[in-house]
Image (spheres, rainbow, N blue to C red):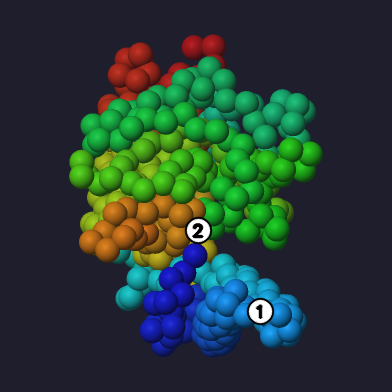
Amino acid sequence: MIDVKDLCENPAAYKESLRARGADESVVDKVIEADTARRTAISRFETLRAEQKEFGKKVAQAKGEEKQTLLGEVKELSANVKAADADADAAQEQLDRLARFIPNRIVEGIPAGGEDDFVTLKTVGEPAQFDFEPRDHLEIGELIGAIDMERGAKVSGARFYFLKGVGARLELALMQMALDQALENGFVPMMTPTLVRPETMQGTGFDVAHDDEIYRLAEDDLYLVGTSEVALAGYHADEIIDFKQGPKRYAGWSTCYRREAGSHGKDTRGIIRVHQFNKLEMFIYCPVEDAEAEHERMLAWEEEMLAKCELSYRVIDTAAGDLGMSAARKFDCEAWVPTQGTYRELTSTSNCTTFQARRLNIRERAEKGTRSVATLNGTLATTRWIVALLETHQQADGSVRVPKALQKYMGGLEVLPLLGK
């Protein structure tokens, strides 16, 4: 949730942030009005409550008829106090409702606009070139016995699949290589829950009432996560974190679920856009002053993984209108997919500043009391990486060369051979 005090002190910055996102900036004025109403209601309640206490002393000292008269007045004053308290609560609820739906204030300088308005920060490596007609990842996956979409659909429906044989081994190899890298950089490995409570989902910044991407188990009022970020964000909810030993870094390994509700007709072939996949997600808690530096580190770790996989890629600074509600800035790493002739997102890393921590009540000790911490997230490996790996490293006969860094995780296998060979 946004910092209401900061918004009231810097309304122009929040309006600019909302304009960059393509959102309605008038909500800023509504929040300021609601905050003023809240302050007025609280002040009235406190004034009446003080009068009630003083009046109580007067009643205690009175006798006889005077006391009976005063007791009548006490009832009226008590009713006024109760009404003022209710007004204060209602004003607070109105303010919370408005503030909860304002997205995070973006980091100054990121591009405005929508999905196509990103800025390319760098391009690394040359797109793969072939002296033969390249096959797409699904055709390759079938030739080497790695992917079975037909039986995935038979068992579970569209956008489900089986990874088998070298396909299953390849995903595990990717995830294990990512985990080893995370361990080298001080991350604590976590196997996270994939079902969470609504307050955890909402606290992370997902709108459970209106987000069509989320699977819900209505009978249990639980939600299937689309990323282990959700569980990791909720891990320290309602806690005070000690950063004396540095940032808290977690690497969450989980299966993820997305309904892909708005993707009808998009990426229907293969495993680019599916309902279920595996992912290793970095999640960091740190003081807000360290958040931008941690964000740069997370991006560097993602690029390190891409280099190990010998993929050509670009890094983009995502435009404000394409950010999720919680992100103040997001970098995407997009790998070249030869048969599509374009770059496709493999990883992203977001700086959520104090937005999630405010919603989940995660703090650190400060000179005076406590203050909200910053949270960041970033992907180190997912099932989708297999798409770029198979297409980039394919050979003329349909077999696939295994990048050197991955070979030890594949039992020394240098080539994914054709099925039966």
Residue plotted at (38% across, 36% down): 251
Dot 1, crowdedness within 10 Å: few (<14), some or many (≥20)?
A: few
How many labels sit on residues?
2
Please identify the quarter of the rendering in which residue 293 is found.
bottom left
Q: Name the spot of residue 357 as percent of width and height, x first.
A: 43, 56
Question: On the image, numbered disc 1 is attached to which residue?
Answer: 63
Q: Which mark is residue 359?
A: 2
Image position of 102 with respect to 305: above or below: below
User: Foreground: 55 or 7?
Assistant: 55
Is residue 346 at all visible to an observer of this figure? Answer: no
Q: Name the spot of residue 366 as percent of width and height, x first.
A: 26, 59
Image position of 42 with respect to 358: above or below: below
User: Foreground: 421 or 90?
Assistant: 90
Please identify the quarter of the rendering in which residue 97 is found.
bottom right
The residue furthest front is 64
Residue plotted at (43% across, 71% down): 3
Q: Name the spot of residue 94 as percent of width and height, x first.
A: 63, 75
User: In 3D space, how far apart are the residues under numbered discs 1 and 2 (Cα atoms)?
Assistant: 52 Å
Report the side of 46 relative to 283 (left or right): right
Q: Which mark is residue 339?
A: none
Type of amino acid under label 2: Arg
Nearer to us of marks 1 and 2 is 1
Residue plotted at (51% across, 41% down): 231
Type of amino acid under label 1: Lys
As helix, strand or loop, the secondary structure at mark 2 comes to helix
Q: Name the spot of residue 412 as percent of width and height, x first.
A: 32, 15
- Disc nearer the start of the sequence (1/2): 1
Image position of 148 with respect to 273: above or below: above
Is residue 290 at all visible to an observer of this figure? Answer: yes
As helix, strand or loop, the secondary structure at mark 1 comes to loop
Report the side of 241 relative to 32 (left or right): left
User: Foreground: 303 or 360?
Assistant: 360
